[in-house]
Image: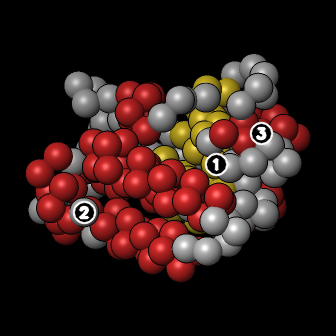
């Protein structure tokens, strides 16, 4: 896995190796009566390790200074972080400042982080529809940060299958990591703006 990341980058590693393998192991686990759960956990740990080490594996330097970060968070109750870890690693590969809040972020903590960090974008992950919070998404879309008279607003990216079918005007819903990177860190853009 590490070699694939080094040779092909984070997006290709996620889309061509990690995600298909995770899906295959997940299907095996679902059809086996809870057998193989240890294989799924072992694989998830190794995928997470490769993603968290991507900056070292790719010999990446510091992220660009001066531009607001992308804030990554799971909706309250959501424990699946691997897709957000892939977004984190891919943003680092493109030298984009990023802050990972991780799993099951309480709404109040996410709102406070938006106010404190002034992100360029907030990526809100939901694996299941039952956890996707339309009220939280609408609140994030309606809030601004910064001093009065110069308020700015973060772009809201609703990621994951939990948001499928949700119609939230003003939010974007990428269909995969490649599309998310095109929105969050286009390769040809000047990220210092």
Front tag of 1 and 2: 2
- Where does residue 25 sit, x and y in percent of width and height? 49, 60
Q: Secondary structure at mark 1?
A: strand
Measure the alpha-carbon separation of dots 3 and 2: 34 Å
Query: Considering only vertical position in the picture, is 41 above or below 1?
Result: below
Q: Which mark is residue 2?
A: none
Tags 1 and 2 touching, CB below 8 Å:
no
Q: Secondary structure at mark 2?
A: loop
Q: Residues within 10 Å of mark 1 (few under 14, many from 20)?
A: many
Query: Considering only vertical position in the picture, is 188 above or below 121?
Result: above
Q: Earlier in the sequence, mark 3 or mark 2?
A: 2
- Where does residue 1 sit, x and y in percent of width and height? 25, 63
Q: Which residue is mark 3?
A: 137
Instruction: Name the outermost residue toward the front.
Output: 32
Residue 85, quarter of picture: bottom left
- Where does residue 149 sit, x and y in percent of width and height? 68, 32
Q: Between residues 106 and 40, which one lies in front from this camera angle?
A: 40
Q: Which residue is mark 2?
A: 1
Q: Earlier in the sequence, mark 1 or mark 2?
A: 2
Front tag of 3 and 2: 2
Residue lying at 25% horizontally and 30% vertically, measured from the top left = 187
Q: Residues within 10 Å of mark 3 (few under 14, many from 20)?
A: many
- Where does residue 135 sit, x and y in percent of width and height? 88, 40
- Answer whether residue 106 is visible to the viewer in this image: yes
Residue lying at 80% horizontally and 43% vertically, measured from the top left = 129
Measure the alpha-carbon separation of dots 1 and 2: 24 Å
Measure the alpha-carbon separation of dots 1 and 3: 11 Å
Q: Between residues 119 and 18, which one lies in front from this camera angle?
A: 18
Tags 3 and 2 touching, CB below 8 Å:
no
Q: Residues within 10 Å of mark 2 (few under 14, many from 20)?
A: some
Q: Earlier in the sequence, mark 1 or mark 3?
A: 1
Q: Which residue is mark 1?
A: 125
């Amino acid at each position: 896995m590490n070699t694939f990341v080094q040779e092909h980058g984070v997006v290709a590693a996620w889309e061509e190796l990690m995600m298909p393998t995770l899906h295959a192991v997940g299907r095996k686990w679902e059809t086996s009566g809870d057998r193989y759960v240890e294989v799924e956990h072992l694989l998830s740990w190794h995928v997470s390790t490769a993603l968290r080490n991507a900056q070292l594996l790719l010999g990446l330097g510091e992220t660009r200074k001066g531009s607001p970060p992308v804030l990554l968070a799971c909706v309250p109750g959501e424990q699946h972080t691997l897709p957000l870890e892939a977004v984190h690693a891919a943003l680092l590969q493109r030298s984009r400042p990023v802050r990972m809040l991780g799993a099951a972020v309480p709404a109040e903590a996410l709102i406070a982080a938006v106010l404190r960090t002034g992100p360029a974008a907030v990526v809100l992950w939901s694996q299941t529809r039952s956890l996707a919070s339309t009220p939280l998404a609408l609140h994030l879309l309606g809030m601004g940060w910064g001093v009065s008279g110069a308020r700015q607003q973060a772009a809201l990216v609703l990621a994951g299958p939990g948001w499928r079918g949700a119609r939230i005007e003003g939010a974007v819903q990428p269909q995969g990591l490649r599309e998310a990177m095109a929105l969050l860190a286009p390769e040809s853009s000047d990220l210092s703006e």
